Image (cartoon, grey):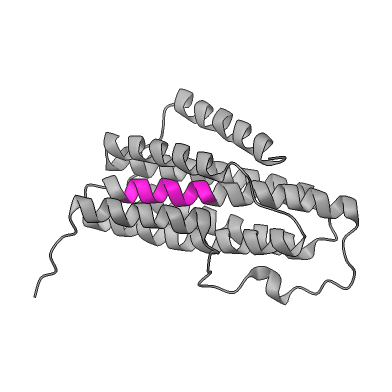
Amino acid sequence: MTESPTSPVDQLIAAADRALRTLAATPAASRPSPAGGVNEPEPLSDGDAREAVALMRVNHVGEVCAQALYDAQALAARSPELRAMFEQAAREEADHLAWTEERIRALGGRTSLLNPLWYGGAFAIGLAAARIGDRASLGFMAETERQVEQHLQGHLDQLPESDAASRAIVAQMKEDEVRHADAATALGGAELPLPVRMAMRLAARIMTRTAHYI
């Protein structure tokens, strides 16, 4: 028996439910945290802990945005196969969301106070990209993941050497982002125009600098 397609209303309700879960619920990971097997014989100094919290808060905001982007792109995807791909990517990014939040709490910090704003803005951007067409949507995904990969490498350079747990999380996140970018390109993602890529970098810079403190 063929399963009936989900109605647009049902899809919107599901998207709203995912938004509430991302912003208000404690995220659950499907994979163990890379920090779980890390031995930390000595606690971080106060300065190192503050820096690690700030950097992991920025990474957590990135994962909030990833949930919004992929939910919007899945909602507007024109083929069931592409919708399933975005939904799978969102599930994998949910692991990152859970890992970063868990690490922030372990360090005695908090997540960004502006998460609803980040989510709403990212959802609107993802929806706009998807409305252009599937190739543009895939290209946006690939470029986003490439920029995130570079951003995570920067955090590996900035995180205190003594914070092995945070570094393990960021390293695994970076590996996953590379895989997502490659998958989007392999599926036919179009290369975005230079002005669009530059605008994405500017928006990311504003977000990361703000989330570092708020």
The residue shown at (62%, 33%) is 205
Q: Is residue 202 above or below residue 123?
A: above
* In the displayed structure image, the side of residue 48 where residue 134 appears, left or right: left
User: Which region shows up in magenta?
Assistant: 64-74
Q: Position of residue 157 (x, y in %)?
A: 76, 48
Q: Is residue 152 visible?
A: no
Where's residue 159, x and y in %? 78, 52
In the image, 192 versus 4, the foreground residue is: 4
In which quadrant will I find the C terminus? top right
Q: Is residue 38 magenta?
A: no
Point out the residue furthest to the left here: 1
From this viewpoint, is residue 106 visible?
yes
Indicate the position of residue 120 as horizontal and vertical percent values: 45, 40
Query: x, y percentage for residue 55?
Result: 72, 48
Q: Nearer the viewer, residue 45 or 12?
A: 12
Quadrant of the image occupied by residue 167: bottom right
Q: Residue at x 80, y 75 (%)?
A: 39
Residue, x 20% and y 50% (percent of image)?
A: 8
Q: Nearer the viewer, residue 194 or 55?
A: 55
Instruction: Report the magenta stretch's main SS.
Output: helix
Magenta region includes residue 69:
yes
**Foreground of the two, 106 or 52:** 106
Which residue shows up at 41% across the image and 42% down it?
123
Relative to 14, 54 lies left or right: right
